[in-house]
Amino acid sequence: MFIILAAISPIFIMIGVGAVAVHLGILPRSSMRSLGTFVVHFALPCLLFRSLSHQSIGQAFNVGYLAAYASGSLFAFFTGVVLAKYWHKRPNAIGAMVGVGMSLSNSAFIGYPLMLQFLGAKAVGPLVMCMIVENIVMLPLGFALAELESGHQLSLFQVIVQTVRRLSRNPLLIAILLGIIASVLHLALPAPIAKVIDMLAGASAPVALFVIGGTLVGIRLHGMATDILQIGVGKLLLHPLAIFVMFLILPPVPRQLVFAGILVASTPMLSIYPILSQKYNYEDTASAALVLVTAASFVTITCIVWTLVRFLPMMFPS
């Protein structure tokens, strides 16, 4: 257990450093948005491009992993939607946001640094596949369901057009596409450009964690307790459990991919969750859920990692 805590604690210590920096006024909370933009538009795309361009596409993608992670995430999403609608009697748009909170992990800002601790350079492959599922399947699905049911009078065609436009401007997906092209064509960048990409890629994990901590400062902890409890239990327990079950019943994948998928699913929801919820007047509950789930995740992730290290080799021999 001490070894696991030693591997996980730097992640949360770095989050704490960001929180302390903002709390003490060393950096304004407003600057976290700029740092987050830096990660999403520069550092992380460089990491994805560099990693994909340096390996064969067959090594970067695993169909079984994609199927298990996507199906487990869809199960968590629709469970959230159904419970919110039929148990808590929430509007359909709110149900969609509850589903997003339960099924979309913070794979870039917390999942990748965590995988890096246990998998090293091999963490990039699972990261890419998780981000493909999240950005091409889960987020568009959440937005589509929310828009169709939110009373904004958007037709299905308009929702599809908006989704395609959003995807075409996503820097992470663009980086993945360019990395695949560079890998297939065996393109080599000039040394100065490659060095800049390496420098930016190296900044992705620490800056991302710093941003998480700074963003959490000042968020008000109020909202609907039942919603927050459902989102928290769904995200930290149901989502990784669903991914685990899918790995059991779908075609087998290497053990390290099973570990990576469950680990990413056990992380809190994406840090822009409150921003995504603003349009549907759900940002207060989403903000409170983000704070509480992130705090609770230190305990749940530690327990899940200990369980995986202890029992995964027995259940997945290879």
Image (spheres, rainbow, N blue to C red):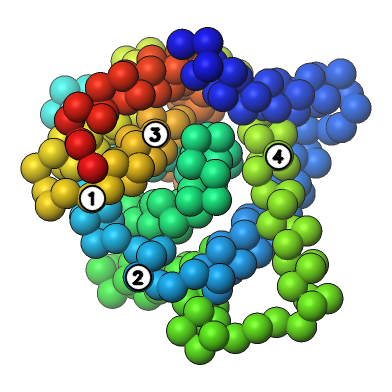
Q: Residue furthest left?
A: 249
Q: Please report the residue visible at 50 percent of the width from the left and 35 percent of the height from the top.
A: 118
Query: Mark 2 or mark 3: which comes first in sequence?
Result: 2
**170 with respect to 188 (left or right):** left
Question: In the image, residue 234 lies at what x, y percent?
Answer: 29, 26
Question: Which amino acid type is marked by label 2?
Answer: Gly
Query: Mark 2 or mark 4: which comes first in sequence?
Result: 2
| Residue corresponding to mark 2 | 58
| Residue corresponding to mark 1 | 253
Query: Mark 2 or mark 1: which comes first in sequence?
Result: 2
| Residue corresponding to mark 3 | 263
Q: Nearer the viewer, residue 211 or 189?
A: 189
Q: Please report the residue visible at 84 percent of the width from the left and 33 percent of the height from the top.
A: 28
Cα distance in 3D space between marks 2 and 1: 13 Å
Circle 2 residues within 10 Å: few <14, some 14–19, many ≥20: few
At mark 3, the secondary structure is: helix
Disc 3 versus disc 1: nearer the observer: 1
